[in-house]
Amino acid sequence: MATGAPAKVSPDVPRERVEVMCRFFDNTGVSDPIPPPYAAPDGYSDLLHVSLKADQVRRGKVSCHLSVGPPLLNTYGGLHGGAVAAVAERVAIGCARTVMREDKELFLGELSISYLSAAPENSELVIDASVVRTGRNVTVVEVNFKLKKSEKLAFTARATFFNMPLAKL
């Protein structure tokens, strides 16, 4: 079982269920330490920087590719859902920036992701982002992840940003 403060368990949960849950967390590595290169203050950016490359940037559109390698894999050998979310956020921010004034700040209000298919290790993903709507206060960006080899849609995301400072209503 993981080290640290013991979890408070409700008395109405059977002990066997608690043990099963604890084994699940231990087997997935939840309590494992983060490897030194990624435990750095901005290790998140370093992880993505190695795998994500911009191909084309135009007003309202961004195209990138992502190499699915070991640092981004889940326990089943596919692209980790958290990595999908991180890439979707990063690409959506870049796309939104192509239509906004430089003095505007962005605040991510919502990020929804549909996980449609797995992206296995050593696969390449083509990521296309486009601005769906932009206004004084809100910018919405759609991000699609397709497997390069089959052109199959693997993930789709939609990010809603609030443009700061908000215009007076």
Image (tube, helix red, strand yellow):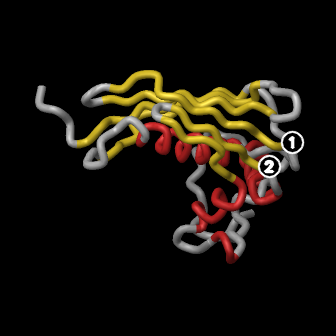
Image location of residue 143, percent across then percent down: 59, 31
The answer to whether residue 159 is visible is: yes
Look at the numbered disc 1 and give the secondary structure of its residue: loop
Mark 2 and mark 1: Cα distance apart in space: 7 Å
Q: Is residue 45 left or right of residue 141?
A: right
**Looking at the image, can residue 11 be seen?**
no
Residue 86 position in % (x across, y down): 59, 47
> Given the image, on which type of amino acid does mark 1 rest?
Pro
Where does the image place residue 126, in percent across and percent down from the top left?
73, 37
At 61% across and 41% down in the image, what residue appears? 56
Q: Residue at x 79, y 49 (%)?
A: 68
Depth check: give the residue in front, 24 or 20: 24
Contact between labelled residues 1 and 2, with CB atoms less than 8 Å apart: yes
Q: Which of these two is toward me, 30 or 100?
A: 100
Q: Nearer the viewer, residue 118 or 145?
A: 145
The residue pinned by badge 2 equals: 68
Mark 1, residue position: 120
Left or right: residue 136 versus residue 36 is left
Farthest left residue in view: 168
- Asked which quadrant contains residue 12, the reply is top right
Q: Residues within 10 Å of mark 1 (few under 14, many from 20)?
A: some
Image quadrant where one finds the C terminus: top left
Q: Is residue 62 above or below residue 45?
A: above
Q: Mark 2: give few (<14), some (14-19) or many (20+) Cα within 10 Å.
A: many
First along the sequence among labels 2 and 1: 2
The N terminus, quarter of image: bottom right
24 is higher (above) or lower (below) than 50: above
- Find residue 16 and report its horizontal and vertical position in percent: 78, 45
State the image quarter where residue 63 is shown. Answer: top right
Residue 26 as seen in the image, left or right of residue 41: right
Give me the residue at 50% from left, 34% from top: 111
The label shown at residue 4 is: none
